[in-house]
Amino acid sequence: MKQWIKRHTILTCLAVLVLLSSCGAVLGDGTNDVDASATKRPLSEAVEDATSQSPSPSEEAAVPEPTQQQVWAAHFDASRRSYVVAVAAALALKPRNLDAQSGSLNACQLLDKRRNLDNRVAQVRKSFSLTSAPTYDQALAALDTTTTTICPEFAAFHQAQTAERTKRLRVEERRRKEREAQAAEEQAQQQYVYYENCTAVEDAGAAPIYAGESGYSRDLDRDGDGVACEQ
C-alpha cells in the first residue's frame, strides 16, 4: 500500500510539472507574438514618429544677427595693422600711442548719428583719446581712413559732407581773393596822388613833398634834391 501511495505521489508531481511547462510555453508564445508585431511596424509610421519628435525649424534656436558695433570690430580686426599705421600717420602719432580700436568705434558712432563734418572733426581728439587737438586736416584724414576701412556703409554720407566742405572752401577762397584785390586797389588809389604843379601842392597843404611820399614827382622837384615844392 505504501508503495502505491509513493508511486501515485510521484506521478502526480510529474503531471503538475508537465502542466506548468505547457502553460509557460503558451504564455511565452503570446508574448513573442506581441513583441514581433511591435517590431514589424511600417517604415512610414517610424518616419512620422521620428519627424514628430524632432524639433521644427521654428523651434530651433535662431542665431542672432551681429550688432553694428560687432561688425565694425570685425573690420578693425581684419585690417588692424594697416589701419593703425594709417591713422597714426594722419594724426602725426606713433602707433603705440594711439587708441585705435576705441577711436574707430567712436568715430563710426558719430557717423551713425549723422553728425555734421565740423562736429565730427571736433570730436576726433575725444574719440581717439588724444592729449592734444589735431589740425582740421589731420582729423579729417583720420576720419577718411576710418570711414573707408571700419564703417564703409557711411562712405557715401561722409564723401557728400567732404565734397560740400570743399565746395564751400572754394567759394570762401574766391571771395577772400576778391576782397583782397579790392582792398589793394583802394589802397593804391589812396596812396597815389597827382599834383599838376606846386600851386596845387600848396593849395592842398602838402608842401613840401619828399621823395617816396604820395604826390612826389621829378617834375615838381626842379633841383632834384629829393624835395618837391620847397618854399
Image (tube, rainbow, N blue to C red):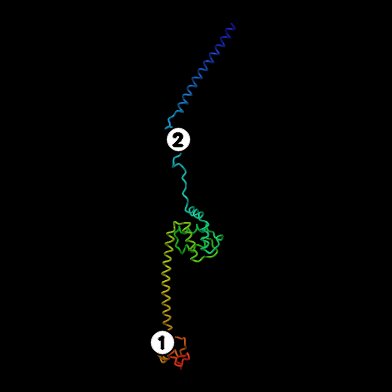
Which percent across, then down, holds residue 132? 54, 65
On residue 50, which mark appears? 2
Tell me the kind of residue under disc 1.
Tyr
Query: Outermost residue, right direction?
Result: 2
The residue lying toward the viewer, choosing from 134 and 145, is 145
Quadrant housing the N terminus: top right
Q: In what element is the residue under mark 1? A: loop
Select label 2 or label 1 by which is in front.
Answer: 1
Which percent across, then down, holds residue 122? 49, 64
Tell me the residue at 41%/87% (across/down): 194
Which percent across, then down, holds residue 177? 42, 74
Q: Residues within 10 Å of mark 1 (few under 14, many from 20)?
A: few
Query: Outermost residue, bottom direction?
Result: 231
Q: Can you identify the residue that label 1 sits on?
A: 194
Tell me the residue at 45%/35% (across/down): 50
Query: Outermost residue, top direction?
Result: 1
The residue lying toward the viewer, choosing from 7 and 162, is 162
Tell me the kind of residue under disc 2.
Ala
Tag 2 near tag 1, CB within 8 Å: no
- Image-quadrant location for residue 195: bottom left
